[in-house]
Image: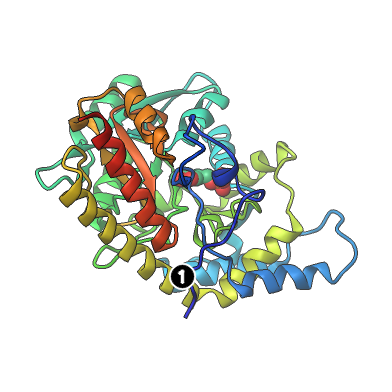
Amino acid sequence: MYNFGQMIDRSGFSKKWDNRLYPVDEGRPLSPMWIADMDFAVPDCVLDAVRERLEHPTLGYCDLDPRFARSAADWARKRWDAPDVRPEYIGYQNSAMGGVVSALNTLTQPGDPVLVHLPNYTGFTYGIAHAGCRMVGSPLVQNQDGIFRMDWEDMERRITEEHIKCMIFCSPHNPTGRVWTREELERLGALCERHGVSVISDEVWADFVFRPARCLPLATTSDYLRRSTVTVCGASKTFNLSGLHVAYSIVYDNDLRRRYQKKAAESHYNSPNTLSAAALIGAYTGGERYVDELAAYIRKNMEAAHEFISQKIPAVKSYLPEGTYNMWLDFTGTGHSQEENIRLLGQQGLIISPGSDFNAAGWFRVNLATPRVQLEQGLQALKSALKAKS
Ligand SMILES: Cc1ncc(COP(=O)(O)O)c(C=O)c1O
């Protein structure tokens, strides 16, 4: 059994622990639960693969080890419902956002509108602006059970009125934790096909899906999507390798893949990183049990957080996510502005991500990938913060 309960002193090695997103009372125990990385140790299968690579004393330009694409394709076949992914569909990306931006550069011209769902992962806001495009947001809508759904009429209206030809889709969805059903993915495919919309499907969270929900790669759900989707995946979230930037793309269509890989290479930022390639091979050849145990641990954290918040912090509404390790919290019932909530949280040493980063002021995202004792400290800090005012 992996020991996810072990606290590791990350200071000096971690943006999450070393940076302050907003001022905090430094006299309080720190609870950094913001940026999406985990406080858990990387498994030995990854560390050993990197160590083994370092046995060779040169680290010059390299070709991508063919095991990279083979192990990524194997992982997609075994762990996701992607039975026919072949190694040649895989392309190295030195970060998921790099892969998203290269896809935008392939599928759009400067000035083009790009559809995203709101709330949206911050990187999409910046990536779209960086590509010189214009973000068009279609708000997700909560049903009576609090589940976020796509608003089909709103999406179709925006696609038609704004002549949208490209969308960025996030599956599982960050920050809401929604895992889309097959029916939803197929309906999205039909909508895109009707209007000739290409999709950049960001699936970096695909390994964090809690049963009975299942994560289906969007591109596998229709022939149209298979031809028109650039999927971006990675081992960074799953194995806590964000500092190594371990990502890749899956593109089924030969022509789209050629155009995309050419664009990705033009930046010169996308040459293989020899250590991250080794890390991915190690992760995908030896890491299945790690991921199973990790997902179970995170699920328990989510249930504990949901129960605590529902019972003890009535001003905040929480929803049990179906995927990711984030929980999307509705703070609108606190009656405070986002700035005031930030001040109260900071006084308790708690750092969580403000909703305005996701185009949803009034909400906060909390990262639950941390040992249980750290989670409990963070939840107590949240409770104290919101008591402080009332
Ligand atoms: C949906 C999504 N895509 C991309 C990224 C960034 O990944 P990378 O650091 O590999 O660019 C994140 C990070 O949180 C994310 O949530």
Asked whether 283 or 102 is in front, the reply is: 283
**Residue at 16% across / 42% down in the picture?**
314
**Residue at 65% across / 42% down in the picture?**
264
Asked whether 306 or 96 is in front, the reply is: 306
Q: Is disc 1 placed on a helix, strand or loop? A: helix
267 with respect to 260 (left or right)? right
Q: Amino acid at mark 1?
A: Val
**Residue at 45% across / 68% down in the picture?**
5
360 with respect to 205 (left or right)? left
**Percent position (x, y) of residue 98?**
60, 41
Q: How is the image coloured?
A: rainbow
Asked whether 243 or 219 is in front, the reply is: 243
Depicted 41 relative to depicted 286: above or below: above
**Percent position (x, y) of residue 88?**
61, 62
The residue labelled by disc 1 is 291
Residue 215 sits in quarter = bottom left
Q: Residue furthest left?
A: 144
Q: Residue furthest bottom?
A: 1
Q: Is mark 1 within 8 Å of ligand 1?
A: no
Depicted 139 relative to depicted 49: above or below: above
302 with respect to 5 (left or right)? left
Depicted 242 relative to depicted 74: above or below: above
**Percent position (x, y) of residue 90?**
58, 59
- Assign the C terminus to one quadrant of the image: top left
